[in-house]
Image (cartoon, grey):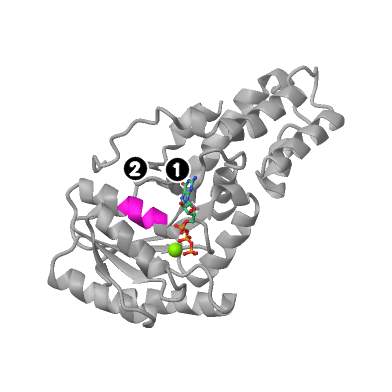
Amino acid sequence: MFGFFKDKFNNLKQTVSNTAQMLVGNVTNAVEQEEEFSEFVLDDMEDVLISADLGVDYAAELVDKLRNQTKIKPADVKQYLKDEFSITLQDAGSTELNVQDGLNIYFICGVNGVGKTTLIGKLAYKFKNSGKKVLIAAGDTFRAAAEEQLDIWSKRAGADIVRRDKADPASVVYEAIDKAKAENFDVILIDTAGRLQNKFNLMEELKKIKSVIDKKAPEALRECMLVLDANTGQNGLQQAKVFSEAVNLTSVALTKLDGSAKGAIVLAVAKEMKLPVKLIGVGEKMEDLKEFNPDEFIEALF
Ligand SMILES: Nc1nc2c(ncn2[C@@H]2O[C@H](COP(=O)(O)OP(=O)(O)OP(=O)(O)O)[C@@H](O)[C@H]2O)c(=O)[nH]1
Ligand SMILES: [Mg+2]
């Protein structure tokens, strides 16, 4: 694609090893030695899939398909899961980042602490490296240190920033779009708050930002990305539902996959929300961001 994610997935297998054990290893251990998919075995398998954070519905669906059939044997369970997971990721849509030659607006949202600001720093760096002119909009004006943190990231990445202490986030975005158009920026990365006085206020704020983008830059290519912490497991699915009601999500970034045993949330989100995971965070450093490649992810899991 755009040539800015050159690094290979050398360490992906290592990154997802805990998830692989929880999801594939434990199912295989529980099932592979059996002769048939008896109710007892299927129950066991369902429990393991649920505890691997695949989601109750998805786990039930996978097990149901094995009921009352004779073609797939327990010894084939690994291949069965591999095929099913591949289809699920495929059905969730393209994992390619939305990038065009004109203006691109990345609207980054998610609950507090999931890694939004860090993701923006890493993304700014990636886009800069690919020769793009990058502007960061400090839309989290709620948390005291948020803009400082973003300032540090923008300097590190060599990106420009629009910040206005304690201002209305929508007005910061308004100003950023004006600046981007006047100075021919390629990408605006919008940071948002993860927590306000309450969930309602947060969702209203996000809607307001979205409507500023719709009005001021309807021609811009949009990526509305929900950031999920891989360690939150099933809670991530709930978050995806809440945010997608407020704004039109186009993708998910899964952070802190390094060391997490709950990476199966990638599959749960793809299955339940039909949202593609496009980026994965694999560490705290500026380079620790990878494009999500479903085939490589599946290969690394199995
Ligand atoms: N190990 C690891 N840590 C990460 C990753 N991404 C972010 N973090 C850490 O997670 C913590 C929170 O990151 P932030 O970027 O501040 O999260 P946020 O969503 O902006 O948080 P709020 O602004 O409070 O809503 C920081 O300590 C980051 O270094 C990742 O991919 N792997
Ligand atoms: Mg933040």
Give the percent coordinates (x, y) of residue 137: 31, 69
Residue occupying image coordinates x 53% and y 76%: 196
- Does the residue tagged 1 have its C-beta within 8 Å of any atom of ligand 1? yes
Q: Is residue 24 above or below residue 172?
A: above
Visible residue check, residue 50: yes
Give the percent coordinates (x, y) of residue 132: 19, 53
Secondary structure mainly formed by the magenta segment:
helix
Which corner quadrant of the figure contains ligand 2?
Answer: bottom left
Residue occupying image coordinates x 55% and y 38%: 259
Label 1 crowd (10 A; few <14 / some 14-19 / many >=20): some
The answer to whether 93 appears left or right of 66 in the picture is left
Which corner quadrant holds the N terminus? top left
| Residue wearing tag 2 | 287
Give the percent coordinates (x, y) of residue 89: 50, 41
Question: Relative to the observer, which residue lies in front, 168 or 220?
Answer: 168
Corner quadrant of residue 43: top right
Question: Relative to the observer, which residue lies in front, 215 or 16?
Answer: 16
Q: What kind of residue is marked 2?
A: Glu
Q: Secondary structure at mark 2?
A: loop
Question: Relative to the observer, which residue lies in front, 246 or 65?
Answer: 246
Q: CA distance from mark 1 to mark 2?
A: 8 Å
Visible residue check, residue 99: no
Marker disc for residue 283: 1
The answer to whether 298 appears left or right of 235 in the picture is left
Q: What kind of residue is marked 1?
A: Gly
Q: Which residues are magenta?
A: 118-123
Which corner quadrant holds the C terminus? top right
Give the percent coordinates (x, y) of residue 116: 44, 59
Q: Is residue 168 above or below residue 229?
A: below
Q: Is residue 9 above or below residue 254?
A: above
Q: Secondary structure at mark 1?
A: loop
